[in-house]
């Protein structure tokens, strides 16, 4: 398991994309990435035997006044695992 990490989800022309960054950076410092639709914290876990990463999202950004959403988990996992390699 990795330490709590911050994230935002940005809407880029109708496609929601994750931006993941260290907990030492404020959510509001990352708002230049696009139209921010949600923000929070995530924990990432390696999935044994499947070469994938699982994510737990939670909390909210006080600086952006946005909360995490249940669908953020799927968005982040899709991007983290899109280049999955079978070893």
Image (tube, rainbow, N blue to C red):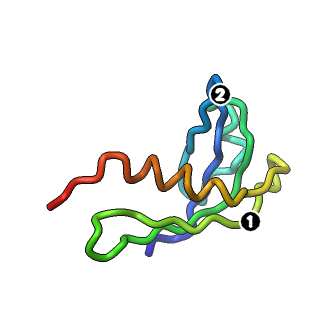
Quarter of the image for residue 37 reads top right
| Residue at the farthest left position | 87
Residue 29 percent across, percent down from the top left: 68, 41
Residue 22 percent across, percent down from the top left: 54, 56
* Residue name at image x 56 percent, y 44 percent: 18
Camera-side mark, 1 or 2: 2
Q: Which residue is mark 2?
A: 14
- From the viewer's perspective, is 8 left or right of 61? left
Secondary structure at badge 2 equals loop
* Residue name at image x 81 percent, y 50 percent: 66
| Residue at the farthest right position | 65
* Residue name at image x 62 percent, y 32 percent: 33
Q: Quadrant of the C terminus?
A: bottom left
* The disc label shown at residue 42, or none: none
Quarter of the image for residue 36 reads top right
* Residue name at image x 78 percent, y 56 percent: 67
Viewer-closest of 36 and 63: 36
Task: Verify CB contact (< 8 Å) between mark 1 and mark 2.
Answer: no
Viewer-closest of 8 and 85: 85
- From the viewer's perspective, is 9 left or right of 43? right
Residue 77 percent across, percent down from the top left: 48, 56
- From the viewer's perspective, is 84 left or right of 57? left
Q: What is the crowding at mark 1: few (fewer than 14 residues within 10 Å), some, or many (at least 20)?
A: some
Q: What is the crowding at mark 2: few (fewer than 14 residues within 10 Å), some, or many (at least 20)?
A: few
Secondary structure at badge 1 equals loop
Residue 70 percent across, percent down from the top left: 69, 60
Q: Which residue is mark 1?
A: 59
First in sequence: mark 1 vs mark 2: 2
Gap in Å between the C-alphas at discs 1 and 2?
Answer: 24 Å
- From the viewer's perspective, is 48 left or right of 63? left
Q: Quadrant of the N terminus?
A: bottom left
Marker count (numbered):
2
């Amino acid at each position: 398991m990795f330490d709590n990490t911050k994230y935002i989800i940005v809407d880029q022309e109708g496609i929601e994309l994750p931006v993941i960054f260290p907990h030492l950076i404020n959510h509001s410092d990352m708002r230049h990435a696009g139209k921010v639709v949600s923000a929070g914290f995530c924990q990432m876990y390696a999935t044994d035997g499947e070469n994938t990463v699982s994510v737990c999202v939670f909390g909210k950004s006080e600086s952006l006044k946005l909360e995490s959403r249940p669908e953020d988990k799927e968005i982040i996992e899709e991007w983290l695992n899109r280049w999955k390699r079978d070893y």
